[in-house]
Amino acid sequence: MGIGSTYGAQGDKAIEHAFELYDCPNALVEQIGVHTNTPLTGYMRSVMRVIGNFPLESMIDELAAKLGIDPATFRLKNYTIYGDQVQKTKYSAKNLHRCIRKAVEESRWEEKRAVYKKENEQRASSKRRGIGMASYIYEGVGLPPYRANATVEVDRSGRASVFCGFVDIGGGQATMATMLVAEELGLEVKDVAVQWGDTDHTEYSPGTHASRMTAEMGPAILQAAYNARKQVFELASRKLGVPADDLRSALGKIYSRSDPARSTSFSEVCKEIAAPGGVIVGKGSRAPNPKDVAFKTFGTQVAEVEIDVDTGHVKVLRITSAHELGRALNPKFCASQHYGAINMGLGFALYERAALDPSTGVLLNTDLHQYRMVSATEAPEISPFNIEAEDPYFAYSAKGVGEAPLVPVAAAVRNAIFFATGARLYSAPMTPDKVIDALESAEEEVERSKVELVNQKVNQKIAL
Amino acid sequence: MLFELPRFEYVEPRTVGEALSILAEYGTRAKILGGGTDLLGLMKDRISGPKMPIPEVLVDVKRISEIRAIEHLQDRSVVGSGVTLTEISSNGELASRFPSFVQAAGSVATKQIRNMGTLGGNLCQRPWCWYFRHPAFECFKKGGRQCYAITGDNSTYFSVYNIGTCVMSHPSDTAPALISLGASVRIASAKNGVREVPLVDFFLGPKSVQENILQPEELLLHASIPLDRGGRGRARSVYLKERIRENWDFALASVAASGSLDSDGRIDSVRVVLGGVAPLPFPLDLSGVLLGRKLDGSTRAAVSSHLSAKAKPLKMNRYKVRIIRALVQRALEAIFTPV
């Protein structure tokens, strides 16, 4: 797998895939750590998951091919609803089967497999096309240490502020908080401000990693907003003469559910907040995940690739990505997460490699020219799909996307190359040197089986 | 890495004569600055050694109008060494006269680098071997005693032909194209005046610390590309490049081919030069195999076996031979398919 030294502590996560992704109660998985004198490595995205997923999902396709079963069917046949095959722990929600079916349907999997197979057999040019898939499990559900706390304040102008200790690293965490508060209070998004990034002014929240922020902070924010809304409704109840539990709010209005004509504006009610400088404060927090339930997000990707068998050049044409996230609070943001993660995953699949000198261990490619990241010309067409399903442990069921769609890219690309050419790649990035080696082994394999077939026929004749 | 630039003196001559006298005065202390896309990176990374001092004086030649022109004469085109790669790749007349040269210039790195980088710089750039580019390895090219790539990681920009003391592969895209087009270069110095050298003789092999014959006091003025390349038929040319990414990459292997067919469809001139696979742009001698023949199964097979027979791959780059065979076949197909 090629694991760097500081990954040691996270070691079990690399093989976690192997005992969680498929129904296999008799699995024996073993991971051996080796000390090396190579430079220390640090965390990159989807820590350990990417390198654990690549060998497992490669093997699944080889098993399916050996049995002559469609890889999608093979994955569905070995489906499990349990997060632990021995303890039989159930997931809070798992709809990976829907991800597989969605990716199959949207990529026109069966049709493409037939077309590419026929086209490849004709050998009209050096180009072969292939289609392959890979499934994955990921976090996006909250992890220890749990410290999800949020505060919502409503002031006399009728505007709200939400205070979170997290950092918006570009994933839209602040927008998520704004939307949840606006929805719960019945305000427009423009009337909600977010304070984040400085725990001098906020309570603690988890660090922004493991794609956990929506899952963990969502319920805390929602609870804080709920507690603030209850206090606003008490003021509104007095003003309108309507019991608080009959009140509803939306888009800056508070109204009676049974008699919607009795209404007032949110800001009008907030003038009643005790002066001077008075604010309504709502607090919220989320408890740790319970131990008797398993929590994960899931997904499946289908990659279509074009391989030049003479030069070993691989171009990824299209990726169809289905990710189960409970609920997409902001579908466009979620789609962006697919785009970002997939392009990053493509770097791991085809280009990015830390080259170490074999005798000294010195890192050789210390620049971004020979450490190749994906640029616009390599980016494939990406079709993202958010698979939604109820999950009562999260705010509106919403869990994470973020890093998750990075996990299966390399395996899906690898399986597409395998489908197109029979080349078995066991190492990423799949650069032309490795692709050509694998192609040559596959060509030899074909030659050997031809010779064996002839020998068998000769032997049969002799026997007759 | 990329630290700050070391301190240096900057001079900006306006004429070739002025530049030559400055170069003569400073000698090995000076370096010629064109687009700077290679030189400044080397300086920032402090790439140096006994035979590679960090330059103290940079002679910026971008303001010398004499070396910044493209001229189309009746029998040849003359391209100044200070012309940018973008100016070459967007020149319509060059594209119709010498497609391979324009394709090669357009395939260099990225748009931003092509906008800055010059023809002279592309011909004279230093190796992209990662041992050479690493300050921790004092390799043969910097004046050290050994080539670290021979026993090290030689998977990418390294040689499979003409292996010697150093196993770098020459990174230039324009050089193979220009050599296959029979180009020559003009070099000037204050002491010896002007000399004209066929570009194929400009580059040095694996036993040399320098990649070319240019002396410290010399300035590369221009490349001259002839229209007549020896055949009677209409000459065609093509440049093909294989790289890991779709752009911003040097060639794992490239091929420039030029040639013509006679009225019977037989090959009456051919020049094929490989890039990225030898310490210098690597001309193939295919005249015995191809001249007077048509491109068919047997000539194709002869070309492939010629390529394989001459190859001496290193431990990690045997795969390049397959790429080279494919590129050469495609290039021959492109120029010798009757229109």
Image (cartoon, rainbow, N blue to C red):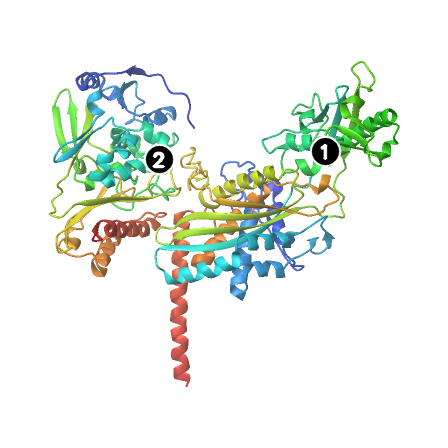
Residue A183 numbered tag: 1
Dot 1: element: helix
Residue B38 shows in the view: no
Q: Nearer the viewer, residue A74 or A441?
A: A74
The residue mark sitting in front, 1 or 2, is: 1
Q: Residue A289, image x and y in percent?
A: 74, 41
Which of the chains bears the disc numbered 2?
B
Quick one: quadrant of the C terminus of chain A? Answer: bottom left
Q: Nearer the viewer, residue A281 or A347?
A: A281
Residue B109 numbered tag: 2
The image quarter in which residue B16 lies: top left
Q: Residue B23, image x and y in percent?
A: 21, 19
Gap between marks 1 and 2 measured at Cα = 50 Å
Residue A264 shows in the view: yes
Q: Residue B303, image x and y in percent?
A: 22, 54
Question: Tag 1: residue type?
Answer: Glu
Question: Tag 2: residue type?
Answer: Ala
Dot 2: element: loop
What residue is drawn where x is 36% and y is 35%?
Answer: B131
* Farthest residue, direction bottom: A464
Which of the chains bears the disc numbered 1?
A
